[in-house]
Image: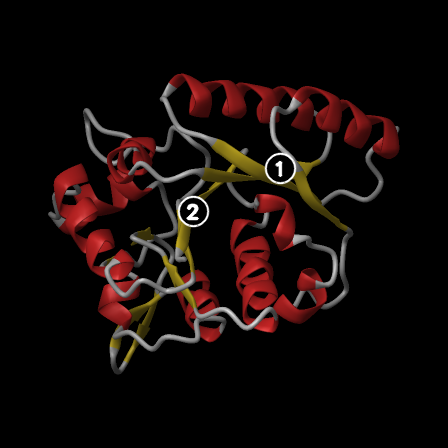
Amino acid sequence: MSAAYFIAGTDTDVGKTTIAAGLLRCARLSGLSTLGAKPVASGCVVTAEGLRNPDALALIAESSLSLPYDQVNPFAFEPAIAPHLAAREAGTALTVPTLQAAMHQVLAYNADFTLIEGAGGWRVPLSDQANLSDLAIALKLPVILVVGVRLGCINHALLSAEAILRDGLQLAGWVANIIEPGTSRLEENLASLAERLPAPCLGKVPTLKAPSAEAVAGHLQLGLLG
């Protein structure tokens, strides 16, 4: 039976893609077909084939199903700025129905394990009125929250979880991505997160010298998703 999840982060630069790639690798190692998508991406690189985003390419590398790039990442922008600002500068309208239709095409492939990765934190704007969280709501996907473990992460994680639940979505699990290994009272912070977040911890990923999907997968437990 196929399963799909929306990957959200407690902030930008907390390792959403690194964790998503690791989860996809876990699923592949379990014999599942996999598919990752990034509906909106800024900070793209100009290539002969068009704009390409490193995060989207990382998801493609861990997807066993092969899709055209434009299906995986239908909205790509060059400037590394907030998506709604990048879209405005490009003269592109980002709407929830448009993104929803694009992601329904991805979900229609019925991979055993599909991940749709957001951008930044839960309330990143898409336009003057809509947020990227509205796409997750429209798709009715359970959420996996990537917690960037550093000073202040407990507050960010709890507020994100509250918002996800208030939006009517399931928090399926969370991953502790230790982006600042020198965080004071690290183990106590991880214990507090485990006590307070209403979902299973799928893994604690240490700071890795080479954070490949394979290396990250070794610290994750996909089976806790149920």
Q: Residue at x 30, y 59 (%)?
A: 78
Q: Of 47 and 225, which appears nearest the observer? A: 225
Judge left or right: residue 16 versus residue 196.
left
On screen, 189 above or below 61? above
Q: Residue 134, position in %: x, y?
A: 27, 31
Name the quadrant containing residue 196. top right
Q: Of 5 and 213, which appears nearest the observer? A: 5
Q: Residue 59, position in %: x, y?
A: 45, 65
Q: What quarter of the picture does the C terminus occupy?
A: top right
Q: What amino acid is labelled 2 in the image?
A: Tyr
Name the residue carrying label 1: 147
Name the quadrant containing residue 184. top right
Q: Residue 84, position in %: x, y?
A: 25, 39
Judge left or right: residue 27 versus residue 196.
left
Name the quadrant containing residue 107. bottom left
Name the residue carrying label 2: 5
Q: Residue at x 62, y 67 (%)?
A: 213
Q: Residue 136, position in %: x, y?
A: 32, 37
Q: What quarter of the picture does the N terminus occupy?
A: bottom left
Q: Residue at x 72, y 68 (%)?
A: 210
On screen, 208 above or below 64? above
The colour scheme used here is secondary structure
Q: Secondary structure at mark 2?
A: strand
Q: Secondary structure at mark 1?
A: strand
Q: What amino acid is labelled 1 in the image?
A: Val
Mark 2 or 1, nearer chain start: 2
- Other residues around mark 2 within 10 Å, as few (<14) / some (14–19) / many (≥20): many
- Other residues around mark 1 within 10 Å, as few (<14) / some (14–19) / many (≥20): many
Closer to the eye: label 2 or 1: 2
Q: Which mark is residue 159?
A: none
Q: Of 1 and 112, which appears nearest the observer? A: 1
